C-alpha cells in the first residue's frame, strides 16, 4: 500500500470526508476513463487533439479534473479514440 493509499484509507474512515469523496466519484470516474482510454490507445494528448478536434489544452484540463465536459465533448473524445461512448445509471 502506498503512502497515499494509506492516508486515503484513514481519511475515508471520517464520515464527512467519505461523503464528500463519494460526491466527487463520478468526476473521478470520467477523468480515469479518459486517461485510461487515451493511454491504452497509445495516443498523446496532442495526437488525441488532432483526431478529436478538441484543443490539447482542453484535453489536459479534462484529464486534470479542471473541466466539466459536455456529452458532445465526450462523444468527440470517443470518436477520436476510435471508441463508442456509453453512459449508464446504476
Image (tube, rainbow, N blue to C red):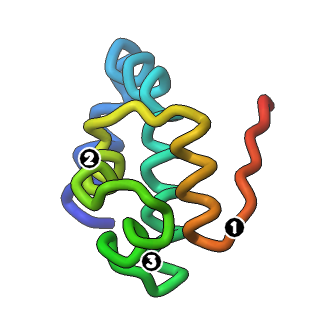
Mark pair 2, 3: CA separation: 16 Å
Q: Few, some or many C-alpha atoms within 10 Å of disc 2 (few <14, some 14-19, many ≥20)?
A: some
Q: Earlier in the sequence, mark 1 or mark 2?
A: 2
Q: Earlier in the sequence, mark 1 or mark 3?
A: 3
Residue 85 image offset from top left, x and y in percent: 71, 52
Residue at figure coordinates x 48%, y 58% from the top left: 34
Q: Few, some or many C-alpha atoms within 10 Å of disc 3 (few <14, some 14-19, many ≥20)?
A: few
Q: Which mark is residue 83?
A: 1
Image position of 13 with respect to 43: above or below: above
> Foreground residue, 51 or 31?
51
User: Which secondary structure lies at badge 1?
Assistant: loop
Task: Give the labeled residue for mark 3.
Answer: 39
Task: Specify whether 83 is left or right of 74.
Answer: right
Task: Give the labeled residue for mark 2.
Answer: 61
Residue at figure coordinates x 80%, y 31% from the top left: 90
> Foreground residue, 33 or 80?
80
Q: How many marks?
A: 3
Residue 42 image offset from top left, x and y in percent: 46, 86
User: Which secondary structure lies at badge 3?
Assistant: helix
Q: Nearer the viewer, mark 2 or mark 3?
A: 2
Q: Quadrant of residue 12?
A: top left
Q: Nearer the viewer, mark 1 or mark 3?
A: 1
Residue 6 image offset from top left, x and y in percent: 28, 52
Mark pair 1, 3: CA separation: 13 Å
Amino acid at each position: 500500500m502506498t503512502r497515499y493509499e494509506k492516508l486515503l484509507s484513514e481519511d475515508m474512515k471520517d464520515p464527512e470526508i467519505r461523503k464528500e469523496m463519494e460526491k466527487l466519484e463520478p468526476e473521478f470516474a470520467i477523468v480515469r476513463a479518459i486517461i485510461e482510454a487515451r493511454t491504452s490507445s497509445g495516443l498523446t494528448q496532442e495526437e488525441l487533439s488532432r483526431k478529436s478536434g478538441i484543443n490539447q489544452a482542453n484535453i489536459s484540463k479534462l484529464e486534470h479534473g479542471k473541466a466539466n465536459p459536455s456529452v458532445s465533448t465526450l462523444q468527440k473524445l470517443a470518436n477520436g479514440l476510435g471508441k463508442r461512448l456509453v453512459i449508464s445509471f446504476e
